[in-house]
Image (tube, grey):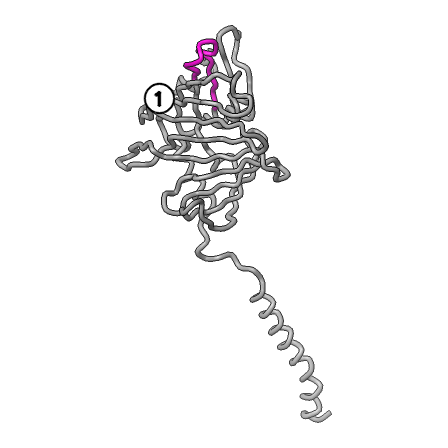
């Protein structure tokens, strides 16, 4: 066989390989690529947690809970004192008088309740209702970075403030909500708005946050939540949590020992 004939026989195979390679490169170019400048969703959540008491050592604050709208008449205002460290918090009811002395302890993903008349602490879920639209987990130190898997969705404005929008999926069943859509301020790094969803994606409640408090941690001033307003998705029922008396101070480890809760 001549060299020319051999080249003509080899040519279709070589052309085919080059053609497939070119098509492959075109196909790769058409695939959606992760943006190099897309923020780290997990880091955004961790930063936002600090402004709600999560991931910081030694904090004390008070929460005043007020209900309005449907069903508010039979739900008295509540006042609680919260003490928190990195992975735990304890809330004590100060008012109303008939609930005074009740305490709720959260350590990692476990929670217990004790109150006058109970012989020993009982295990509870952060999903249990505290008052109105507020769950027990809403008043504990927030640690979404530990409890949820975060996925970056997009950037959009809330009012005139640019925000990162995140999808948070519960890492286990010991969380306050199954899913959360979370708006974190681009400029301030704090949560501005949230929608609390069922596992199927049904909207249950929504929340807005304000940050008129501040704390100083390791010489750095950080914003701290001053108001959380939680609204029911189907009615006009709303619970407003107001945060005050925020102090950075050491809290003894014994405060977070379930054996000392009683």
Q: Residue at coordinates 57% horizontally, 30% vertically from top-left?
A: 235
Give the image location of residue 7, x and y in percent.
67, 88
Q: Could you tell me which quadrant the N terminus lies in?
A: bottom right
Q: Which residues are magenta?
A: 92-106
Q: Residue at coordinates 64% horizontally, 76% vertically from top-left?
A: 19
Q: Quadrant of residue 189?
A: top left
Give the image location of residue 153, x and y in percent.
52, 49
Nearer to us in this view, 68 or 256? 68
**Residue 99 part of the magenta segment:** yes
Q: Residue at coordinates 70% horizontally, 93% vertically from top-left?
A: 2
Vertically, is 136 above or below 97?
Answer: below
Mark 1 lies on residue: 251
Q: Residues within 10 Å of mark 1 (few under 14, many from 20)?
A: some
**In the displayed structure image, the side of residue 227 where residue 166 appears, left or right:** right
Vertically, is 71 above or below 262?
Answer: below
Vertically, is 24 above or below 171?
Answer: below
Give the image location of residue 262, x and y in percent.
47, 10
**Residue 224 part of the magenta segment:** no
Give the image location of residue 101, x and y in percent.
44, 11
């Amino acid at each position: 066989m001549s060299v020319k004939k051999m080249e003509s026989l080899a040519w279709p195979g070589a052309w085919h390989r080059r053609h497939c390679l070119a098509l492959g490169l075109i196909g790769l170019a058409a695939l959606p690529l992760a943006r190099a400048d897309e923020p780290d969703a997990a880091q955004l959540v961790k930063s936002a947690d600090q402004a709600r008491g999560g991931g910081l050592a030694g904090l004390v604050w008070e929460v005043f809970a007020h209900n309005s709208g449907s069903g508010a008449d039979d739900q008295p205002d509540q006042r609680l004192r919260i003490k928190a460290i990195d992975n735990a918090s304890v809330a004590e009811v100060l008012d109303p008088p008939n609930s005074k002395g009740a305490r709720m302890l959260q350590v990692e993903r476990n929670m217990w309740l004790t109150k006058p008349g109970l012989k020993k602490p009982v295990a509870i879920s952060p999903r249990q209702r505290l008052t109105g639209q507020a769950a027990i987990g809403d008043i504990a130190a927030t640690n979404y970075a530990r409890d949820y898997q975060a996925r970056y969705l997009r950037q959009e404005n809330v009012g005139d403030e640019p925000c990162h929008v995140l999808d948070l999926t519960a890492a286990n069943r010991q969380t306050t909500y199954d899913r959360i859509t979370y708006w974190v301020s681009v400029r301030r790094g704090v949560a501005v708005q949230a929608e609390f969803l069922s596992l199927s994606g049904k909207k249950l409640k929504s929340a807005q946050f304000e940050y008129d408090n501040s704390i100083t941690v390791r010489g750095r001033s950080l914003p701290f939540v001053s108001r959380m307003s939680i609204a029911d998705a189907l009615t006009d029922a709303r619970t407003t949590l107001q945060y005050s008396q925020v102090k950075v101070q050491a809290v003894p480890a014994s405060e977070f020992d379930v054996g000392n809760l009683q």
